[in-house]
Image (spheres, grey):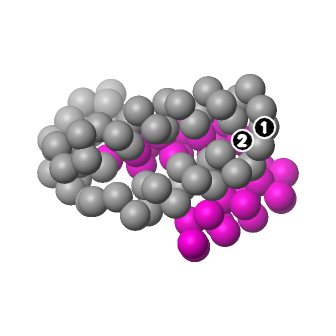
């Protein structure tokens, strides 16, 4: 619930929706695809496309809530993240 409330507050203050999508996508990439069959990535892609088309705040709120509830295993992310820093 907290993730959805924070997302709602972010959007209601007029902050950048594209930055919010970047942050949510980043967190979706950090979730363990092995434990959730990559659903976080698929859902993030679908939500981003739908939000860009509709601008409905409920969409990124649902994505944030799903990411917050998903299993956390950043071992894989920690191995490939340094490659992106360059």
Q: Are marks 1 and 2 in contact (CB under 8 Å)?
A: yes
Q: Residue furthest bottom?
A: 2
Disc tally is: 2
User: Which residue lies under the disc numbered 1?
Assistant: 55
Instruction: Find residue 69 and report its horizontal and vertical position in percent.
Output: 40, 64
Residue 18 lies in magenta, yes or no?
A: yes
Residue at 61% of width from left, 27% of height from top? 49
Above or below residue 11? Residue 80 is above
Q: Is residue 20 above or below residue 4?
A: above
Dot 1 alpha-carbon crowd within 10 angstroms: few under 14, some 14 to 19, many 20 or more: few
Q: Say which quarter of the image contains residue 41.
A: top left
Q: Which residue is mark 2?
A: 17
| SS category of the residue bearing label 2 | helix
Disc 1 from disc 2: Cα separation:
9 Å
Residue sitting nearer the eye, 64 or 23 = 64
Quadrant where the N terminus lies?
bottom right
Q: Nearer the viewer, residue 15 or 45?
A: 45
Left or right, 78 with respect to 38, comes to left
User: What's the residue at 46%, 38% (across, down)?
Assistant: 43
Q: Is residue 54 left or right of residue 28?
A: right
| Classed neighbour count for the residue bearing mark 2: other residues with Cα under 10 Å, few (<14), some (14–19), many (≥20) | some
Along the line of sight, which residue is nearer the eye, 36 or 52? 36
Of callouts 1 and 2, which one flags the residue occurring earlier in the amino acid sequence? 2
Q: Magenta segment: does it hold 24? A: yes
Residue positioned 33% across, 34% down in the render: 85
Which segment is the magenta one? 1-30
Identify the image quadrant of residue 76: top left
Rendered-image quadrant of the C terminus: top left
Picture coordinates of residue 9, whole percent (x, y): 75, 64
Looking at the image, is 9 positioned above or below residue 54? below
The location of residue 81, given as percent across then percent down, is 26, 39
């Amino acid at each position: 619930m907290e993730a959805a409330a924070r997302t709602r507050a972010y959007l209601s203050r007029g902050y950048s929706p594209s930055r919010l999508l970047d942050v949510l996508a980043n967190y979706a990439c950090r979730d363990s695809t092995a434990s959730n069959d990559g659903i976080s990535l698929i859902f993030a892609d679908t939500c981003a496309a739908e939000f860009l088309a509709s601008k409905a705040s409920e969409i990124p709120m649902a994505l944030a809530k799903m990411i917050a509830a998903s299993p956390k295993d950043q071992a894989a992310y920690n191995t490939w993240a340094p490659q992106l820093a360059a």
